[in-house]
Amino acid sequence: MSHATHTPPIYGLMAEFDSSTDLVVATRKAYAAGYRKMDAYSPFPIDEASEALGFHKSRVPLIVLLGGLLGGSSGFALQYWINVISYPLNIGGKPWDSWPAFIVPTYEMTILFAGVCGMFGMFALNGLPMPYHPVFNVDRFSMVTRDKFFLCVEAADPHFDIVETQQFLESLQPLSISEVPH
Amino acid sequence: MKQGPEEKTILEDVPWADEPPVILPGQTYGSVTDEIADAVLTRPIGFGWLAGLLVGMTFVAILGMAVTYLFIRGVGIWGIEIPVGWGFAIINFVWWIGIGHAGTLISAILLLLKQTWRNSINRFAEAMTLFAVACAGMFPLLHMGRPWLFYWMFPYPASMGVWPQFRSPLVWDVFAVSTYFTISLVFWYVGLVPDLATMREKASNRWTKIVYGILALGWRGSARHWKNYEALYILLAGIATPLVLSVHTVVSWDFAIAILPGWHTTIFPPYFVAGAIYSGFAMVLVLAIPIRYYYGLENMITMRHLQNAAKVMLATGLIVAYGYLFETFIAFYSGSTYERFMIENRWFGQYAIFYWLLILMNILTPQLLWIPKLRSNTRFLFGISLIILAGMWLERFVIIITSLQRDFLPSAWGHYIATRWDYAVYFGTIGFFATAIYLFIRIMPAISIFEMRTLLPEAEVKAE
């Protein structure tokens, strides 16, 4: 890009819908119209909405897997080091490395790390906690935690044009359209 | 939670004509939101709730006194004595942790099995798990005698250079129970975040708004967030499922790895897990029946939920009965004098009355649940759940006390009588549990709001 980048005067334009079907249809149309920097907001998870945004793969499973591997291996290593190397105890004549006995804490550490890493990973991927976000500047947006569905096309999108995007959103027949200030 | 195209919508999901639905018709996104959130936000504090809280807190005060006296005098104030060194503390530990199991079963296993009816009861069942595990955790700590040295159980670089002995099930228990509590907390909190955002928007009081707002972390319902969220939720369910089975298995190993007659048996893990779910569902009913009645949530916690819980109790109760049967069979079949004596001691010994009460309360009475008419009678279900809870407590009493008081050598025999301090701590934890539940239903939405929205027929995206 040759011209100087400047902050757009608004965050984006937001259209409000009444049903999950309307939201998904509108999102698909917006994606087809070339918009990419946009987000769909809903009061409950809608698989089709993230698909329509072109967001197909979550990285949470990878984080959970890595957390589990880390927890399991460190759990086993801890027990091995303690009961074999640092502080060997003869318990009933069992071998120092009586690994079947170490399975339970290894297993519990796998679960613990997988779950805790998954939670922090999910929040981190979602950029939460986020105390301020421009979408909350729209009064109607509080209904997203109740029964309304929103599609916000962001001004940062290269296709965004305040007049054209407004007309495009109107063609989707939303309940209302609002400008989202920064 | 996920509603794939091959699944029926929840209103169609009625296997028999007279089967009550999971959610009564006529609900909208707004009405489920209001009904659940208003029970917390706008409903005035009633006399019944205050009275209940007061009773609960009275017992918390008794718990405080009992624990203070315990710290001053030591575990000698309890009825434990050699040979019965485990007494009430371990009975209550096993009882409470078993009760917690139903919460994880409902939230995780039923999610994986796509049992959508779980959506109306998972939230408070998870809270029940947390509080029950908290109660359970107190007992081993208090039973240590020197609870201020509890950190000795964890592997940490001690100045004395000693480390835990990882071949002992008691050390496994530390890992199992602390992981269980942490993962239950994670599951519960992750499930709460979208609902906390709803509470944030609905709260009218400024401070309430701020507190819910902080807890909701700025959740805004973005489709990308939901995608990550759902991925995590299903994975948490996947890892919590083997976890819940492992926890009571490890608890049962505390017994099964000892060589004591009545403990040293391979049937313990499945039989303990089934017993845990049995008592846990009983506690779910004890909580659900009054909550749905007093908060008018009968259209979301329907008879279907209560009947399903009753059926789970019937099934797990039969597994427990099978466990009792096989304990007895093996005692005679093994040809071991000590095993046979253990059963005879349970039948005719000093504590025989508890064994027969146990059979009556845990095995015989619950067979009434076969009768469909009784399964739809809330008063009956409430009563039988209390009986099962008492029965499961007696089961742990019988296992622990009768095996310890009569082991191999008659010269080492003894007996066990609980003191008032045993009862004070036990009833104190019941008061703690009740207080926590009373506060929970007034502070957090007791039913998962966003998961209820997904149950409505209009939640499904229709094909163009």
Image (spheres, coloured by chain):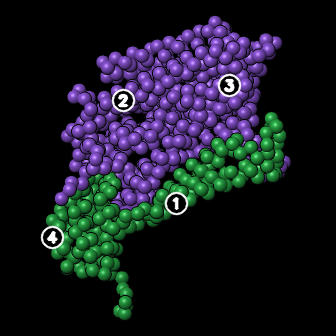
Residue B31 in view: no
Could you tell whether B195 is left or right of B253 in the image? left
Could you tell whether A48 is left or right of B189 in the image? left
Element at label 1:
helix
Q: Which residue is under mark 2? A: B308
- Please name which of the two marks, 4 or 1, marks the residue nearer to the observer: 1
What is the residue that sits farthest to the bottom in this orientation? A2
Q: What label sits on residue A63 in the rendered view?
A: 1
Q: Position of residue B139 (x, y in %)?
A: 64, 32
Q: Do pointers 1 and 2 mark residues of a single chain? A: no
Real-space CA distance between mark 4 and mark 1, rounded to the nearest whole angstrom: 40 Å
Against B59, residue B365 (above or below) is above
Q: Are marks 2 and 3 in contact (CB under 8 Å)?
A: no
Q: Are marks 1 and 2 in contact (CB under 8 Å)?
A: no
Q: Residue at x 49, y 63 (%)?
A: A124
Q: Position of residue A1 (x, y in %)?
A: 37, 90
Report the amino acid beneath label 4.
Ser
Against A85, residue B75 (above or below) is above
Q: Which residue is under mark 3? A: B264
Against B164, residue A172 (above or below) is below
Q: Which chain is purple?
A: B
Against B229, residue B95 (above or below) is above
Q: Residue at x 62, y 30 (%)?
A: B252
> Relative to the observer, which residue lies in front, A126 or A79?
A79
- For disc 3, the neighbor class at 10 Å (few under 14, some 14 to 19, many from 20) is some
Q: What label sits on residue A171 in the rendered view?
A: 4
Element at label 4:
helix
- For disc 2, the neighbor class at 10 Å (few under 14, some 14 to 19, many from 20) is some
- For disc 4, the neighbor class at 10 Å (few under 14, some 14 to 19, many from 20) is few
Q: Do pointers 4 and 1 mark residues of a single chain? A: yes
- Please name which of the two marks, 4 or 3, marks the residue nearer to the observer: 3
Real-space CA distance between mark 4 and mark 3, rounded to the nearest whole angstrom: 73 Å
